[in-house]
Image (cartoon, helix red, strand yellow):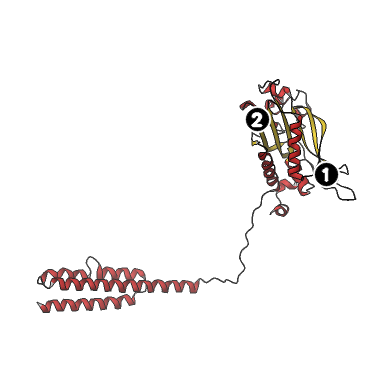
């Protein structure tokens, strides 16, 4: 019986030795897996020896069992060692074929930048938000009521003519200003209201200083006691934040259907050179930046407010004009053509 045990132990040693040799010849992990099944699998060589355990006497069984386990560990270890070697070899070969030339210059990627109009709009947002204004928006396709009637445009006002307004076939129109947003906001809310409304507007117009599509930002403050002094204070604060702490503003009487009284607002020219003439303000020392006024009582009536109880002011400015003045741009069309060479100048 001892012979039988010794013979088995010896065959285990032989098996381990054979396995090592075969592992060494394997060149792919797939081969290793097949060898693993042959030696250690369910019908593998080791299992066959293990199954012969029952042919031994009870005192011999633990001896063989222990040897089988040791052999199994050795074979597994040899297998994993070879697996690591194969992987390293594979990696070495890959690197030999797929090398990287670190001395080559990198590919440059174009970086996007904020469009000057967007950047000006953000700056305006930040100023008016700090004064307590919320941002309100409305549709570009409007009806006559919101774009004209509610804003006190009389039926024969020239702005209603096709010369100025882009009319759509269904009787709607493209809004000619952002003021319809005031109407929609007042219809949907009760005072106090303090909003700025940015957006695209459309008119039949195209030359170096006019585009058929341009953007406005409009402000509206309605409450029980709002005066022209509040309007002036608000616009002075805006002008000083935007153009500089010492810049003066002036209000000139003007006319708009939806405000009464109405004014045009100028800021002191920030471009005037010392000595020599200024092409921006034509030597007047002032640049017109926006239109404003106290909301006309007829507008309040159109939205169902009592003009005896509420007051308010409104102002509107062209964002392109603000951007053109800020960056010294002399043709409004440059802002819409999206020529990368032009836009690149504003990348920070
Ligand atoms: Zn000037």
Residue extending furthest toward the right: 276
Q: Which mark is residue 300?
A: none
- Mark 1 vs ligand 1: CB below 8 Å: yes
186 up-or-down from 247: above or below: above
Residue hosting label 2? 193
Q: Position of residue 11 (x, y in %)?
A: 19, 77
Which of the pair 172/64 is nearer the observer? 64
Q: Earlier in the sequence, mark 2 or mark 1?
A: 2
Q: CA distance from mark 2 to mark 1?
A: 32 Å
Which residue shows up at 31% across the image and 68% down it? 33
Name the one closer to the observer, 59 or 35.
Answer: 59
- Secondary structure, mark 2, is strand
Q: Position of residue 149 (x, y in %)?
A: 71, 24
Which residue is found at the position 72% from the left and 31% from the top? 314
Q: Nearer the viewer, residue 187 or 208?
A: 187
Residue at position x 70%, y 54% in the image: 344
95 sits to left or right of 301: left
The quarter of the rendering in which ligand 1 is drawn is top right
Say the numbered circle drawn on residue 269.
Answer: 1
Q: Is residue 151 left or right of residue 11?
A: right
Residue 127 sits in which quadrant? top right
Mark 2 near mark 1, Cβ–Cβ under 8 Å? no
């Amino acid at each position: 019986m001892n012979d039988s045990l010794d013979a088995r132990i010896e065959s285990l040693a032989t098996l381990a030795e054979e396995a090592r040799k075969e592992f060494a010849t394997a060149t792919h992990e797939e081969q290793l897996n097949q060898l693993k099944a042959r030696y250690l699998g369910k019908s593998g060589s080791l299992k066959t020896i293990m199954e012969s355990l029952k042919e031994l006497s009870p005192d011999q069984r633990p001896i063989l069992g222990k040897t089988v386990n040791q052999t199994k560990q050795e074979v597994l270890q040899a297998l994993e060692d070879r697996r690591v070697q194969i992987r390293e070899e594979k990696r070495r070969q890959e690197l030999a074929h797929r090398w990287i030339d670190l001395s080559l210059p990198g590919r440059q990627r174009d970086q996007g930048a904020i469009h000057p109009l967007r950047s000006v709009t953000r700056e305006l947002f930040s100023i008016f938000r700090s004064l307590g204004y919320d941002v309100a928006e409305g549709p570009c396709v409007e009806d006559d009521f919101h774009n004209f009637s509610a804003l006190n445009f009389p039926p024969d006002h020239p702005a209603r003519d096709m010369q100025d307004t882009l009319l759509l076939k269904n009787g709607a129109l493209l809004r000619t200003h952002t003021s319809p947003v005031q109407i929609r906001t007042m219809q949907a809310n009760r005072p106090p209201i303090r909003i700025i409304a940015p957006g695209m507007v459309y008119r039949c117009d195209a030359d170096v200083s006019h585009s058929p599509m341009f953007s406005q930002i409009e402000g509206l403050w309605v409450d029980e006691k709002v005066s022209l002094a509040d309007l002036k204070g608000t616009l002075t604060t805006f002008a000083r934040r935007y153009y500089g702490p010492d810049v003066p503003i002036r209000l000139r009487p003007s006319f708009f259907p939806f405000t009464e009284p109405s004014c045009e607002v100028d800021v002191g020219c920030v471009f005037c050179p010392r000595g020599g003439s200024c092409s921006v303000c034509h030597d007047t020392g002032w640049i017109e930046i926006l239109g404003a006024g106290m909301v006309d009582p007829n507008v309040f009536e159109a939205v169902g407010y009592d003009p005896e109880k509420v007051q308010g002011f409104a102002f509107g400015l062209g964002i392109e004009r603000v951007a053109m003045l800020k960056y010294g741009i002399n043709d409004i069309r440059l802002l819409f053509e999206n020529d990368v060479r032009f836009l690149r100048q504003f990348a920070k």
